[in-house]
Amino acid sequence: MLPSIDLGPLLTALERALLPPQCLTCDAPVPRSDGEALVCGVCRSRWRRVAPPHCARCGGTLPPEGSCGFCADWPDALAAVWAAVWLDEGARQAMHRLKYDGWWRVSEAVAIGMQPVPLLRVPSVLVPIPLGRRRLRTRGYNQAERLAAALARLGGHEVRTDLLVRRRETGTQTKLTPEARRVNVSRAFEAAGRVEGRVVLVDDVLTTGATLAEAALALAGAGAARVDAVTFARARPPATMLA
Ligand SMILES: [Zn+2]
Ligand SMILES: [Zn+2]
């Protein structure tokens, strides 16, 4: 008997590879010169960068009084984090396509948007945040891994998917409070062996930093000299967190 293979993700990928390039956000044709980018230059230019002055640790805009509350509770293992743009309408749409609509090629456009991120100025070892096995099966790919691969192609970085493993599946975080998020991802990752030098975690969205902090603890515990992290977008804090 033949083993049962889920052809869904494969067929979706094939169908999408055969379609003419068209911007996924505004439907305008994407010029061939834009390579694999599936979000046109105009839409990419609408992604809003986080305004300076930046917190050196989390890349957020520093409040007038000068000290950042957003990253104050992060463990020392997580040295610095930078998100390229705000998770506003256009960026949210791109992330949704990337994660839930199966358009992994959006990662090319997203990687272009992440090019100016200061933590990626030197060729680095990129470690995508691993996906739980169940979610990997339903999605067919890990969006963080696609992002890391696209960044590597553009910036000459190296991708390592063998350094970090997810020990357990964590439920969706979208509706959780910052404290509940921390509990939810607590000890969710472990290093797969000895880790050396500096590594840069890659994920799609920075919300509270809880996931990145847990991953950084695992890598630092296994010997990493420094753990930084980059994400495409930064979620705007809910009004309750600003109070
Ligand atoms: Zn567009
Ligand atoms: Zn900060």
Image: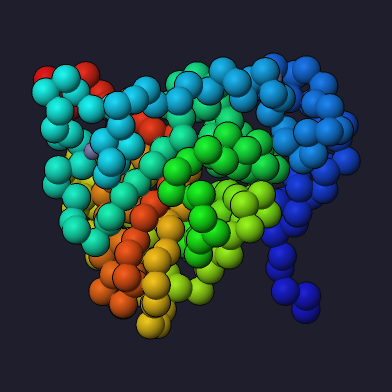
Q: Above or below — where is 7 with respect to 12?
A: below
The residue lying toward the viewer, choosing from 57 and 102, is 57
For image coordinates 72% across by 51% down, the residue present is 8
Q: Above or below — where is 238 with respect to 10?
A: above
Assign ligand 2 to one image quadrant: top left
- Residue 237 lies, in percent from the top left, at 27, 27
- Residue 128 lies, in percent from the top left, at 49, 58
The residue lying toward the viewer, choosing from 7 and 145, is 145
Q: Is residue 141 left or right of residue 213?
A: right
Q: Quadrant of residue 17?
A: top right
Q: Is residue 85 left or right of residue 223?
A: right
Q: Is residue 133 left or right of residue 191?
A: right
- Residue 185 lies, in percent from the top left, at 27, 55
Q: How many marks?
A: 0
Residue 190 in sight: no
Residue 33 in sight: yes
Give the quarter of the figure containing the C terminus.
top left
For image coordinates 82% across by 21% down, the residue present is 29
- Residue 93 lies, in percent from the top left, at 56, 26
